[in-house]
């Protein structure tokens, strides 16, 4: 059905825009089930990745390999998540978020089960690394996109609570994995993990599409051609979506004045334009021309270099300092508990909008890098416990808002494609981070050098956030200037009309 304009602004510019508010996100009701689904998806994807450090020592001893060789398992999984994210976004647009997530749950479950029978590291790379990461991308990306559609005013808090699933399940899975390894070996533990990840299919079943959606492709075309976004079609089902051509026809019928140029453009559209429209429907590749988005993506690349290395090497670092295995595993549990608090608390703070979101993210990234640089100074269990608590708290503060910042950079209507491209670009950092850290560890024979590398990478990533903040300030300044000029022009026009009326 078509959304009817509520009011026509007769004093608007000649582009014929109509002021009608778009459909708002529910921010409640069934949105809480979407939040529950996203909460579990975070836990069963990135929570498992963070808890995989428990397997590290066992696999390292079993295959008698190097730190770099074991690091490639997690690295391939993380990189695959990032590289496949745009594919998951496109498949969600073509079919549905629900079906893509269910398929992803099946893939990662099969990958982990096959990994339990691996005879060498190459087979672990292909199963626990590639297949598992492919399934994670198919589940995490569509679920997080759906969460952004269901929440608007509470989006920072919703993202924080959803990401808290990573912390809670990490806290639970680390001692569980250690117990399973002691009881059934690392192969038996992987078999049980494969069955556990079938719950991702249940998470997919909870995803229900919004009753009212807007065609993002048409919105992009409308912005380029000067159309009003409020006159675009509204679709009540996943099938039978009206085309942009129909939207343009409706606009032309609604207002004969001001749309002649649009009608000419529509009549002269070439096959190349039509192909471009079809592509934009699934993948908004125009994002790569967005300077602010690309700067934020570069922040993601360098941040990813330091994201996953600490979680992978913290337990081996503690074991190298003479700490027993269950105490070493407890360090990750401490980190996960403070990570949970950091996500919820700082997500709540972000929801209050007391501080600019980019500034808050910049401060937390710099602080996180500083904490990692101080890690090699810790050697006893108590000192490592303090480090784990500090790392978890600041890491949670950062993760709580970085997706919210992405939504502010590109807008929620383009979040699906933006999330896919952001993960794709960030994937290079996720792929290289753990192996680079492993390389320094092998060369220096000290796990502390891996934390130094991660800290430096995060400090560098903060420089791109500072650049983004400056770009935002310049953009706001130019917008304010344009508004003031328009206001002055309207004021002069009003005074001129009043003078003419006085003369008559």
Image (spheres, rainbow, N blue to C red):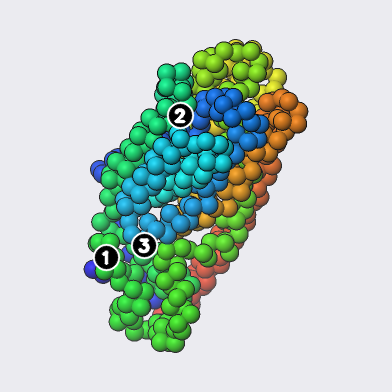
Q: In the visual, does 52 lie left or right of 91?
A: right
Query: Mark 1 and mark 2 in contact (Cβ < 8 Å)?
Result: no
The quarter of the picture where residue 288 lies is bottom right
User: Disc 1 versus disc 3: distance between alpha carbons?
Assistant: 10 Å
Query: Mark 2 and mark 3 in contact (Cβ < 8 Å)?
Result: no
Q: Secondary structure at mark 2?
A: helix
Q: Of circles 3 and 2, which is in front?
A: 2
Which sits in the foreground, 240 or 362? Answer: 240
The quarter of the picture where residue 413 lies is bottom left
- Above or below for 481 versus 143: below
| Mark 3 vs 2, N-terminal side | 3
Q: Does residue 131 show up? A: yes
Q: Residue at x 72, y 33 (%)?
A: 440
Q: Which residue is mark 1?
A: 239
Q: Residue at x 51, y 44 (%)?
A: 126
Which sits in the foreground, 45 or 217? Answer: 45
Q: Which mark is on residue 94?
A: 3
Q: Which residue is mark 2?
A: 187
Where residue 214 sits in the image (x, y, percent)? 34, 62
User: Disc 3 versus disc 2: distance between alpha carbons?
Assistant: 37 Å
- Above or below for 267 versus 152: below
Where residue 152 sits in the image (x, y, percent)? 38, 48
Tell me the quarter of the image containing the N terminus. Answer: bottom left
Tell me the quarter of the image containing the C terminus. Answer: bottom left
Q: Secondary structure at mark 3?
A: helix
Q: Residue at x 43, y 42 (%)?
A: 111
Q: Secondary structure at mark 1?
A: loop
Q: In the visual, does 290 lie left or right of 224?
A: right
| Mark 1 vs 3, N-terminal side | 3
Q: Does residue 454 show up? A: no
């Amino acid at each position: 059905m078509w959304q009817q304009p509520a009011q026509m602004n007769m004093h608007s510019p000649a582009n014929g825009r109509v002021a009608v508010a778009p459909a708002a996100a529910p921010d409640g009701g069934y949105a809480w089930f979407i939040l529950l689904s996203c909460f579990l998806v975070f836990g069963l994807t990135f929570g498992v990745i963070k808890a995989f450090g428990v397997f590290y020592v066992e696999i390292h001893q079993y295959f008698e390999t190097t730190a770099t060789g074991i690091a490639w398992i997690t690295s391939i999984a993380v990189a695959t998540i990032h590289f496949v994210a745009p594919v998951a976004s496109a498949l969600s647009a073509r079919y549905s978020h629900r079906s893509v997530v269910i398929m992803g749950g099946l893939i990662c479950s099969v990958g982990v089960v096959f990994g339990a029978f691996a005879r060498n590291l190459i087979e672990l790379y292909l199963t626990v690394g590639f297949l598992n990461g492919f399934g994670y991308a198919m589940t995490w990306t569509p679920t997080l996109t759906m969460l952004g559609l269901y929440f608007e005013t509470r989006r920072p808090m919703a993202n924080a609570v959803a990401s808290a699933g990573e912390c809670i399940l990490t806290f639970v899975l680390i001692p569980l994995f250690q117990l399973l390894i002691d009881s059934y070996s690392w192969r038996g533990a992987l078999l049980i993990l494969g069955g556990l990840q079938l719950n991702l299919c249940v998470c997919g079943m909870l995803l229900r599409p919004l009753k009212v959606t807007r065609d993002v492709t048409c919105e992009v075309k409308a912005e380029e051609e000067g159309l009003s976004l409020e006159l675009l079609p509204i679709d009540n089902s996943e099938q039978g979506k009206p085309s942009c051509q129909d939207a343009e026809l409706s606009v032309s019928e609604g207002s004969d004045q001001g749309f002649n140029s649009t009608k000419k453009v529509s009549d002269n559209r070439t096959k190349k334009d039509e192909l471009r429209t079809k592509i934009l429907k699934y993948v908004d590749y125009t994002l790569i021309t967005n300077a602010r988005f690309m700067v934020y993506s570069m922040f993601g690349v360098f941040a990813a270099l330091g994201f996953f290395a600490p979680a992978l090497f913290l337990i081996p670092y503690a074991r190298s300092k003479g700490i027993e295995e269950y105490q070493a595993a407890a360090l990750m549990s401490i980190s996960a508990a403070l990570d949970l608090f950091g996500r919820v608390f700082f997500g709540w703070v972000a929801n209050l909008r007391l501080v600019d979101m980019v500034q808050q993210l910049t401060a937390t990234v710099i602080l996180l890098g500083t904490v990692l640089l101080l890690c090699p100074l810790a050697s006893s269990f108590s000192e490592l416990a303090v480090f784990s608590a500090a790392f978890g708290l600041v890491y949670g503060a950062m993760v709580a808002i970085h997706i919210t910042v992405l939504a502010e950079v590109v807008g929620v209507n383009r979040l699906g494609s933006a999330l896919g491209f952001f993960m794709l670009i960030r994937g290079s950092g996720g792929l290289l981070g753990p192996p680079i850290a492993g390389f320094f560890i092998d060369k220096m024979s000290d796990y502390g050098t891996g934390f130094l590398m991660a800290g430096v990478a995060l400090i560098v990533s903060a420089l791109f956030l500072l650049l983004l903040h400056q770009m935002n300030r310049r953009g706001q300044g130019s917008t304010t200037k344009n508004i003031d000029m328009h206001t002055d022009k309207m004021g002069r026009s009003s005074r001129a009309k009043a003078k003419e009326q006085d003369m008559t």
